[in-house]
């Protein structure tokens, strides 16, 4: 922005060693003056004038002191529902039938009042000049952007008649449905799944964040905060580890809790390869080598054990530590192994043993041992805790220090702070994005379990996104059609290979049509070119979206859906309140709700009987269940109150605070007796390996030889690890074309360490080509001293039309660990050159 | 009475919520921003300077009109269009402004923008507050302290909800105001103090 010399003396900061005055006094700027992505003027909008959508008046409206407020201005309740896990309750101001502002709803608990730069920009998505106005059919090559407008009747008839034909010719599973996380509203997210299951069609699982989900569910069990204490409890922590997590950018709604904790004396530790915005506020930044997190965790477990820092009482009480693993089959020794008759429907309880050799169930043996190998009635067994620590034994601090590129002293300090506690591990999705990611979450939970840093105020290990609504009150799954015969499940990173091979793990698979809603895989999933190749092999791709975004642009038929504020909804997750979306304005153009679209398709398919519910009837029905009934939650009550506090706890919900976890053993599992893949599509995986922690290098992103782990030879051609991060101005690809946000951040950029840039002759602001064997993308380079040498970071969410050339998703790989099918976004190597 | 702000740089994450709230509420034209979020770090926004990994620096400075106690923009204005209200808020009377740009040159904070001849908007209806200021082409635009909100007892749009809880506002002359209480005992800086403008935005360090 400025040519004015900035001479404010206070900006020196506190870097030891000092920097030149020129560097210390600059207030930097990127975007002002570069606004090339601004769209056409308002005159080109041609907006339809609509009026008449109803929302109930709120008390505050009547008492609003706003002077000169027009008579037809009203405020509706609503909620932001993208996959940032914000779940922000909003007040939507409507004037002359149009949304003119969005502000944070004044929830009773001030700390949960939320909004962000995107939340303030909703009206730019509603009144987007490129909003899809009517159904369209492709007339040119895929991706050419050539379309003809068709009527809803034509669109529905064509889709339904082709689906009938495909299912008759090629089997029911020749049609597949794929959702994503583009709308967390209960109707939008779930209703199309009813049709899929009624049709017997295939489910394509979208597969992201699954390393986190997998370990969270199986090792820790889910509760009201999914696998974590309520976020507000973090103020009780004395040590907070933001592990591969950057809430300052990715979850701004949570940041103030972390800052409050810091002010109350907590040490904030960031473990990340790159110096993030969160790291810039931390007390300790641990710059880990990418993809080595589990080696660090195993060293921590090992050190805790070797130095007598484990919490014996907690291990005995709340973990599988004292359970006895049979040498013969790796399963827990249970009552039936000792000849006890197990009554029908009774639990075949695991056996534990005390120091005197008395054995029995954990109810019978009050003070079990959790270490050692011995025989019980001739059966050789080892305590699960012993197997855990033995699996970590070779990870000395020195070995982890070498592998992770962190000093032993730093690891020692980390362990000291963590063990002292109470400590919170705030899980993030950095480690999730490597093929070896699942064990990171598994071992984090193991570490928390053996140090007792779980189930107490300030002590938790997870990522909090309030789950109470889905767990207790909102039950879309109960509304499966009575004649449903669900088809097979496949996983998104495998889909192209399945279609090419015409089989899924030996089962025939002849996919001909794909229906995609609340999802934009070509903009968000790995290996974009594989998706285009996939689409080219299909007969009919149908996409439901508000605009012709990356995926819609390659479809055969695109159906226009409503904006979030144009229909009623229930938001059941990510907020401690169950939230109502009122219909603030009428749907623009010919856009329809997912419920209406699916009902039309179902009727054309001949399933009218199961699909006669209106949107409102469906929403009301999702709240008709025992859990909601018990706590007096109904659709009418929600409509009346707009938000209902559903988070238990006094004052805050504590995950596992009762000492009981919703796992297979009701305890914290750091030994998997019966390892199960996260999504079972019939794949095989190494069962023995899946029981305990282990570390192996990432599949691709291992560019240097460290210890005995040899570099990926691909690094000779492509030496840089390609990572992405949340783009502040988008939620994945949503808000990607909001003009205000594009004024602030106008084109795809890639951040690079100064030394890596210099070696390639790259300066700040240069356009650079990033490439590997999978594809390429052109970005503007930004020199960032906080980038780890050898690692680049591209804020994500840009779409094809915003790149000079290529797309960031061309660079990423579809490789994954079959135990945890996932999009492994960071497990990729590239090279960069000046464009 | 002297309205002012505290912005806590130890909490700010550079999210731009304040800037977009202002843009929305005040119905600002395309390319016009009354709040700028600066990174004191690398050359680009959201980047650090220094040396990886132990010697890195990156701090955010949201910068809007500082509503100075000695506003140089007011003293240089040849027509009396730039004025300071009794509550300290500095505003521009677009009827009197001739768009000469003297204040742009004089202001050290680079927060004034001379509106172009043609003002465009991303939608064809007025958004934000129903009484948002009118934007007049060819004259000076700047943060007006949300005077229309302040006059009815509300906080400026940028102060409504900061995700990081880094922004505080109120009467600096009133020790009981939110801003005075937040500033109490905290180390702060003001920008360009050497210019003698006595800005009323305090950056908490």
Image (cartoon, grey):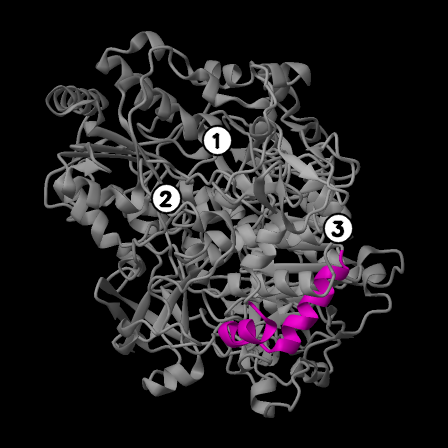
Q: Nearer the viewer, mark 1 or mark 2?
A: 1
Q: Secondary structure at mark 2?
A: loop
Separation (CA) of disc 3 from disc 1: 43 Å
- At which x and y percent is residue A37? 34, 60
Q: Main secondary structure of the magenta part?
A: helix
Q: Secondary structure at mark 1?
A: loop
Who comes first in sequence, dot 2 or dot 3? 2
Q: Which mark is residue A185?
A: 1
Q: Residue at x 66, y 77 (%)?
A: A409
Residue where numbered disc 2 is placed = A128
**Labels 3 and 1 touching (C-beta < 8 A):** no
Q: Is residue A37 visible?
A: yes
In the image, the segment drawn in magenta is: A395-421
Residue where numbered disc 3 is placed = A312
- At which x and y percent is residue A217? 53, 39
- At which x and y percent is residue A181? 42, 40
Q: Is residue A415 magenta?
A: yes
* Camera-side residue of A301 and A165: A301
Q: Quadrant of residue A79?
A: top right
How many numbered marks does the figure carry? 3
Quick one: which residue is furthest to the top in this view?
A609
Who comes first in sequence, dot 3 or dot 1? 1
Q: Residue at x 59, y 37 (%)?
A: A221
Within 10 Å of disc 2 (Cα), the crowding (few <14, some 14-19, many 20+) is many
């Amino acid at each position: 922005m400025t040519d004015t010399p900035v001479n404010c003396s206070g900006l020196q900061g506190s870097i030891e060693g000092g920097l030149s005055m020129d560097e210390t006094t600059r207030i930097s700027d990127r975007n002002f003056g570069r606004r090339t992505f601004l769209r056409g003027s308002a005159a080109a909008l041609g907006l339809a004038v609509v009026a008449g959508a109803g929302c109930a008046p709120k008390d505050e409206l009547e008492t609003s002191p706003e002077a000169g407020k027009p008579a037809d201005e009203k405020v509706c309740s609503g909620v932001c529902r993208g996959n940032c896990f914000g779940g922000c309750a909003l007040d939507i101001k409507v004037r002359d039938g149009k949304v003119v502002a969005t502000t944070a709803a004044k929830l009773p608990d001030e700390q949960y009042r939320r909004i962000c730069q995107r939340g303030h920009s909703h009206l730019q998505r509603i009144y987007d000049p490129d909003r899809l106005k009517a159904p369209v059919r492709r007339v040119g090559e895929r991706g050419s952007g050539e379309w003809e407008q068709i009527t809803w009747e034509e669109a529905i008839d064509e889709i339904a008649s082709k689906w009938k034909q495909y299912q008759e010719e090629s089997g029911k599973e020749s049609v597949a449905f794929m959702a994503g996380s583009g709308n967390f509203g209960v109707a939008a997210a779930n209703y199309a799944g009813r049709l899929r299951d009624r049709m017997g069609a295939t489910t394509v699982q979208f597969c992201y964040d699954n390393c986190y989900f997998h370990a969270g569910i199986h090792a820790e069990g889910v509760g009201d905060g999914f696998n974590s204490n309520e976020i507000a409890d973090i103020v009780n922590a004395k040590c907070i580890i933001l592990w591969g997590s950057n809430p300052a950018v990715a979850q701004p709604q949570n940041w103030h809790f972390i800052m409050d904790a810091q002010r109350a004396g907590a040490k904030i530790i960031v473990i990340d390869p790159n110096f993030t915005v969160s790291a810039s506020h931390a007390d300790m930044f641990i710059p880990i080598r990418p993809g080595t997190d589990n080696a660090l965790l195993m060293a921590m477990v090992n050190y805790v054990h070797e130095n007598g820092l484990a919490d014996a009482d907690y291990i005995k009480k709340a973990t599988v530590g004292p359970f006895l693993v049979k040498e013969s089959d790796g399963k827990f020794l249970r009552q039936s192994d000792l000849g006890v008759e197990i009554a029908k429907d009774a639990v075949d309880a695991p056996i534990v043993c005390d120091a005197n050799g008395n054995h029995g169930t954990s109810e019978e043996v009050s003070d079990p041992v959790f270490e050692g190998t011995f025989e019980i009635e001739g059966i050789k067994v080892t305590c699960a805790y012993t197997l855990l620590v033995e699996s970590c034994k070779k990870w000395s601090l020195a070995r982890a220090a070498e592998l992770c590129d962190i000093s032993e002293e730093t690891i020692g300090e980390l362990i000291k702070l963590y063990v002292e506690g109470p400590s919170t591990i705030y899980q993030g999705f950095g480690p999730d994005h490597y093929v070896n990611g699942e064990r990171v979450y598994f071992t984090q939970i193991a570490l928390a379990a053996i140090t007792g840093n779980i189930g107490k105020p300030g002590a938790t290990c997870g990522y909090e996104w309030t789950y109470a609504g889905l767990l207790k009150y909102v039950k879309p799954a109960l509304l499966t059609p009575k004649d449903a015969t669900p088809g097979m499940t496949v996983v998104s990173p495998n889909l192209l290979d399945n279609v090419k091979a015409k089989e899924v793990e030996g089962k025939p698979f002849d996919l001909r049509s794909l229906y995609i809603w609340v999802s934009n895989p070509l903009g968000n999933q790995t290996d974009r070119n594989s998706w285009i190749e996939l689409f080219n092999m299909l007969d009919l791709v149908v996409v439901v979206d508000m605009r012709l975004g990356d995926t819609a642009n390659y479809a055969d038929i695109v159906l226009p859906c409503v904006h979030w504020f144009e229909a009623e909804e229930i938001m059941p997750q990510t907020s401690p309140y169950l939230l109502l979306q009122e219909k603030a304005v009428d749907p623009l153009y010919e856009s329809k709700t997912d419920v209406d679209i699916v009902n039309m398709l179902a009727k054309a398919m001949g399933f009218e009987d199961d699909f006669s519910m209106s949107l409102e009837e469906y929403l009301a029905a999702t709240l008709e269940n025992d859990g909601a009934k018990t706590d007096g939650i109904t659709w009418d009550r929600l409509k009346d109150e707009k938000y209902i506090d559903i988070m238990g706890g006094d004052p805050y919900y504590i995950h596992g605070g009762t000492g009981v976890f919703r796992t297979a053993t009701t305890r914290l599992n750091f030994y998997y007796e019966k390892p199960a893949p996260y999504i079972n599509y019939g794949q095989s995986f190494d069962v023995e390996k899946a029981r305990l922690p282990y570390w192996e290098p990432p599949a691709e992103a291992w560019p240097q030889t460290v210890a005995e782990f040899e570099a990926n030879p691909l690094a000779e051609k492509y030496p840089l690890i390609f990572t992405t991060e949340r783009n502040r101005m988008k939620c994945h690809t949503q808000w990607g074309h909001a003009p205000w946000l594009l004024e602030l951040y106008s084109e795809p950029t890639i951040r690079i360490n100064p030394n890596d840039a210099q070696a390639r002759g790259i300066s700040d602001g240069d356009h650079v080509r990033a490439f590997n064997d999978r594809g390429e993308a052109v970005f503007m380079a930004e020199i960032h001293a906080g980038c780890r040498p050898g690692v680049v970071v591209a804020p994500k969410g840009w779409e094809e039309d915003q790149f000079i050339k290529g797309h960031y998703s061309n660079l990423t790989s579809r490789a994954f660990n079959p135990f945890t099918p996932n999009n492994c976004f960071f497990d990729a190597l590239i090279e960069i050159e000046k464009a | 009475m002297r309205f002012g702000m505290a912005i806590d740089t130890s909490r700010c994450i550079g999210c731009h919520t304040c800037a977009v709230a202002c843009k929305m509420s005040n119905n600002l034209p395309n390319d016009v921003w009354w709040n700028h979020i600066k990174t004191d770090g690398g050359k680009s926004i959201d980047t650090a300077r220094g040396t990886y990994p132990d010697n890195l620096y990156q701090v955010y400075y949201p910068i809007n009109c500082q509503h100075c106690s000695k506003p140089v923009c007011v003293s240089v204005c040849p027509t009396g269009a730039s004025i300071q209200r009794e509550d300290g808020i500095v505003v521009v009377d677009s009827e009197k402004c001739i768009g000469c740009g003297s204040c742009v040159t004089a202001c050290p904070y680079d927060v004034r923008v001379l509106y172009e001849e043609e003002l465009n908007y991303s939608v064809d209806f007025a958004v934000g507050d129903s009484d948002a200021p009118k934007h007049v082409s060819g004259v000076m635009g700047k943060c007006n302290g949300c005077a229309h909100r302040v006059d009815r007892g509300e906080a400026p749009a940028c102060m409504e909800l900061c995700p990081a809880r880094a922004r505080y506002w109120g009467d600096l002359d009133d020790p009981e105001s939110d801003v005075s209480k937040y500033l109490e005992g905290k180390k702060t800086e003001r920008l360009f103090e050497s210019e003698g403008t006595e800005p009323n935005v305090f950056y908490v360090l």
